[in-house]
Amino acid sequence: MEFRTTSALLYLDAVSVSFDGFKALNSLSLTIAPGEMRAIIGPNGAGKTTMMDVITGKTRPDEGEVLFDGTHDLTALDEASIAVLGIGRKFQKPTVFDSHTVEDNLRLALAGDRRARTAIAWRETVAARERISSILETIRLTAARSRLAGNLSHGQKQWLEIGMLLAQDPKLLLVDEPVAGMTDAETHQTAELLRAINAEKTVVVVEHDMTFVRALGVKVTVLHEGRVLAEGSIDQVSENERVVEVYLGR
Amino acid sequence: MTARPLDRGTLVFLGLVAAAAIVVPALNLALPESSPLHVPTYLVSLFGKYVCFALLALSIDLIWGYCGILSLGHGAFFALGGYAMGMYLMRQIGGRGVYGNPLLPDFMVFLNWKELPLAWWGFSSFPYAMLMVLAVPGLLALVFGWFAFRSRVTGVYFSIITQAMTFALMLAFFRNDFGFGGNNGLTDFKDILGFNVQADGTRAALFAISCVALMLGYLVCRVLVASKFGMVLIAVRDAEARARFLGYRVESYKLATFVISACMAGVAGALYVPQVGIINPGEFSPANSIEAVIWVAVGGRGTLAGAVVGALLVNYAKTSFTSGPLAPYWLFLLGGLFVGVTLWLPRGIVGTVQHWRARRREVAPDASGPAEGAPDGAAQKPLAAE
């Protein structure tokens, strides 16, 4: 596409995905503006993870349009190309490279040439080393930099994965349940961290933890049965009758 | 961090293999048979066979130990390399065969074929045959891997289709009309590059060349695994989806590794054939590929040196075992070995040693240091940071 059809960074229009007849996404439409931070909530099976899968190229939608930056049709690209375009994704279960050190995890995530044929002659630059050190500061893992990622605590792994997203330097971060299994203090720090990241990047957070969503203080989208049920501030959506109904059961 | 390809362990390894490449032929050729240190020619060939198996094990370790892809079909690449060499050796026989046909190998005369099949063209040329030793396994791996990795066939499914691949090739090569000697395979070799394959000097040279090939193979693996390429391989092994979402085209890395690994296995097969004097479809047997994987598991996967140690040890055990009264029970022992290693020595021999050493090094500098950070150092690190 030559011309931008939308000013949104991420634009989903009438996206549907079904698995064996089950509609995981049912004509979902959603727009995320550049620089925005959005929280996405919804009961189990609402389609949150499927939505992430569609945006990152893991799942192809049956119908609908998914545009990134107004020009890139994400439905035609695979995971690696989408990652290179500038969409980073944090998984629900912290996923890091266990047998690499914390530092090497970031090194692998650092933006740059991803090709196999140039990887053999790759040498690290001074700028890259400094960037790694600064990310280690941000995610508070400087002291653990040469430990194996497999030996980190659950919360540290979550942070390392967020650090890897930062190293990737994406325009859009998709963060799936970042505070699952974290202590209250860690949850609080994570909210701070995400807000700091949001100063430069667009962030979409999927989360169950209502206190955390409230702490983020951003616009909330409620998904239910594969479509948007409500949108607004956390107070607005929690007063919405249908949202209450969906969360409490009919 | 990327490591130096030529670390201390690598230099020690290369030194040992180089020493073997010189000492074994020297003890065979320079000493009289009456000397107690004389190495008989049959042993030189037997050791040469072990070295070829070690190279095959190394190729499996590269793809399995580092990239986490369990190929149960590497015996096929080994056999294809062996057939390419066998075809060259067959063409060298020329008019000295039983039927005295200067152009056609004996089995073709026997089948009443009038001309050389297309697939055999060019094999009278040594350079062409050597090219095929690399190209045939490499191309098969390229096509097979391209489809498998692009369709994201992983884990046990990949292992199963590689078994099917080697089984299918075995059935094809068993057929007489397939044109590669059928059941009997290729044998009765006379000479290689003009040297008699039976002669002591040739056998010693083949042993030394096998050692050099093993050293080169080891170097290739080290260069790969010590680079960022190797870091990505381990990343793919640990969390494939994470690597993909970071923007790495996982299938390219897998395919490149699979092809390099297949070429190495092909070279191993090519050096094996002149030393044992025969190649037949039995080499494609699925059990062979599984056996080679056991060598790597015993030695320690993801350590390179472990693959070599495992191949040498298990094959030495096989030779001693199958030449005694316990011969019929070898497969039970082999199976037991695999189960035992999986249960009690999951890192393999070399992996366990490296693990101990890494632990000692971490604890030693500051024994009173924080207990939490100290011992976990190389918990799962496949390659102790030398």
Image (cartoon, helix red, strand yellow):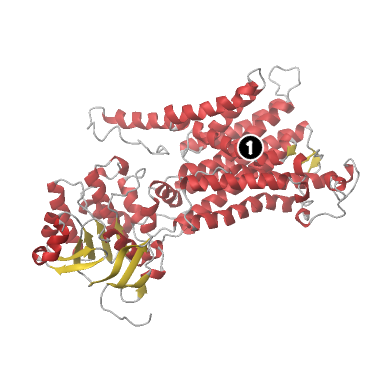
Image point (68%, 29%), residue name: B46
Please give left or right for residue A133 compared with residue B182 in the image. Answer: left
Toward the viewer: A25 or A208? A25
What residue lies at 41% left-to-right and 70% top-to-bottom?
A76
Kindly tell me whether residue B255 is visible in this rendering. Answer: yes
- Number of numbered callouts drawn: 1
Q: Quadrant of residue A23?
A: bottom left
Q: Is residue B256 left or right of residue A90?
A: right
Q: Position of residue A139 (x, y in %)?
A: 22, 52
Compared to residue B69, the image places residue B117 above or below, namely below
The amino acid pointed to by label 1 is Cys
Pick out the residue farthest to the right. Answer: B100
Q: Chain of mark 1?
A: B
- Image quadrant in which the N terminus of chain A is located: bottom left
Q: For this view, does B9 lie left or right of residue B242?
A: right
Query: What residue would you read off at disc 1?
Result: B52
Residue B146: x percent and y percent? 54, 57
Q: Nearer the viewer, residue B43 or B111?
A: B111
Closer to the camera in the image, B174 or B307? B174
Q: Quadrant of the C terminus of chain A?
A: bottom left
B41 w.r.t. B54: above or below: above
Could you say whether the residue bearing mark 1 is in a helix, strand or loop? helix
The percent coordinates of residue B245 (x first, y second) are 36, 58
- Place of residue B102 in the rendered image (x, y in percent of width and height, measured from the top left): 89, 49
- Residue displayed at 24% across by 44% down: A154
Q: Is residue B73 above or below residue A32?
A: above
